[in-house]
Image: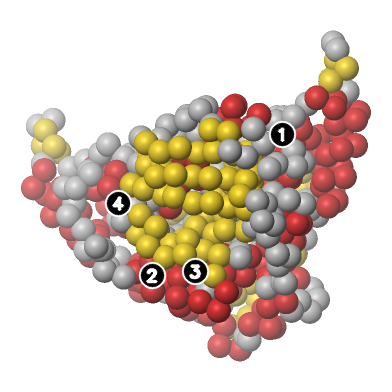
Amino acid sequence: MAFGPTVALDDVALTVERGQVHALLGENGSGKSTLIKILAGYHRPDPGGRVLVAGRALSFGNPVNAASLGCRFVHQDLGLVDTLSVAENLFLTSGFPARWGTIRWARLLRAARDDLARVGLDLDPRQPVAGLSPAVRTGLAVARALRPGAGNVALLVLDEPTATLPDDEVRQLLATVRAAAATGAGVLYVTHHLDEVFDIADVATVLRDGRVVASSAVPDLTRTRLVNQLLGSELDEAHASSQALPPPRANAVLRVHDLAAGQLRSLSLQVRAGELVGIAGLTGSGRESALAAVFGAVHPEGGDVLVDSTPLRPGHPRRAIDAGVAYLPADRKAHGGIMSLPAAANLTLPDLRALWRPPMLRLGAERVEARSWFSRLDVRPAGAVHLPLAALSGGNQQKVLLAKWLRCRPRVLLLDEPTQGVDIGAKAQIHQRIVAAADDGAAVVVSSADVDELVALCHRVVVLRGGHAVADLSGPALSVPAVNRAALAAER
Ligand SMILES: Nc1ncnc2c1ncn2[C@@H]1O[C@H](COP(=O)(O)OP(=O)(O)OP(=O)(O)O)[C@@H](O)[C@H]1O
């Protein structure tokens, strides 16, 4: 299957067995999403290929046929309705049990309990979805996909279900995935996390440049072998992420005092020029809203933010940008970029001054600049600056959005989940760029569910729990177990 000159998939063959978890891995842009979109009936591949589901041929470009053959998909966007209950969400796609035009609630609740038990979820089906943790929400989407009322399930496809989940929630979700395979469905599981492959997968297939480079039984694999299959060369993973950090300067650039927003009750923080500070915490700890509140993307309920001793006006992101603050949000599709605009335009959007020759924007110069950032962050395909952002793979979109803020040479760089969806090689490149921005004098704050990432990347890590900072770890006290201990300790 090709998009113009880009061959996204080339002669791909794989078999997912019933009752097994089959991991699908590959660098950003290697073709994973394209394969899933073909299975889901979204893309029609070039003639010649075929897909059999439980022995029956899939009719390409036809989502209804994919569903009737028993293919189910849990995409990164889970498609849950927050204002409805767990039970109502379960029945949304398959229809509610009804008699004489009235919903039979008792029957619905009974069936919902069975659906939840099938994937090991201990939930009250009457509770609203809005209050559920991300892992439980994903588990609920899995339970919905496996509902017997929705027909026989032959294949369950999960697209990076753990991309931004904290460790303890990943464990919870993996148990749900195991339970899903135990129901007899074949599970195709897309991930960038190698640990998960060894935790739950029976088989791992690796794509590179649209081709299958290896398909191995997981017991026959080692981590090094898998990394080599992914990257096509040796990569010293430890070296890639843990690097000697340049020391921070003396002057505090960012001062946050008693900030409150959403689940964040009180955050006070000083970040010096050249300093990399991590923010850790479980779902609900206040971590998710912390950086958005500092930037003003959400209106804080209280507190002050100062950049170089000048207070920012709360809830006014444009003022924050003018003061030299850059913010990469966690949800790149909703808030991070404009998917329909070319990648080059996304890159230059926050600061067009150098490209503006009234009454025209110098589009040629914009492309030249975008190409140079593409090469610095190894965005692929290298010549794709003119393509809409939506046409880049997820990990490459993330690199473009990071480049957009690095280009502004911010005084304060706020990064929410900066390496979500990026492959292990690209993660190391992104870390190097973030360290370079700090070395250039930026005060950097990184919020991430990935504690390994924070410990490898930051001078110190502030741990949030119950909306408050409960630990500030640095030097020898900074380690993955220490951060996890602080994040998990009993609520105050
Ligand atoms: N609609 C499209 N138009 C043009 N090119 C596309 C389109 N969709 C995908 N591509 C290209 O096809 C290739 C494969 O992309 P795909 O999204 O399948 O990668 P992926 O393995 O899912 O990557 P990631 O891990 O970053 O999500 C990439 O080079 C991508 O830019």
Q: From mark 2 to mark 4, how far is it between C-alphas?
A: 22 Å
Residue located 45% across and 70% down the image: 483
Q: Earlier in the sequence, mark 2 or mark 3?
A: 3
Q: Left or right: 51 with respect to 92?
A: right
In this figure, which residue is indicated by the disc labeled 2?
Answer: 486
Location of the C terminus (image quadrant): bottom left
User: Could you say which is closer to the camera, residue 132 or residue 369?
Assistant: 369
> Residue 473 got which mark?
3
* Identity, as a three-letter code, of the amino acid under mark 2: Ala
In terms of sequence position, does the residue under pointer 2 or pointer 4 come before the other? 4
**266 shown above or below 358:** below
Label 1, label 2: how far apart the Cα atoms are: 38 Å
Task: Specify which label sits upstream in the sequence, 1 or 3.
Answer: 1
Single out the mark in the foreground, 4 or 3.
3
Q: Earlier in the sequence, mark 1 or mark 2?
A: 1
**Element under disc 2:** helix
Residue under label 4, please give it: 132
Q: Amino acid at mark 4?
A: Leu
Q: Quadrant of residue 191?
A: bottom right
Alpha-carbon neighbours of circle 4 within 10 Å: few (<14), some, or many (≥20)? some
Horizontal side of 358 relative to 437 (left or right) equals right
Nearer to the camera, 43 or 236: 236
Contact (CB < 8 A) between labels 2 and 3?
A: yes
Q: Secondary structure at mark 3?
A: strand
Q: Residue at x 82, y 47 (%)?
A: 374
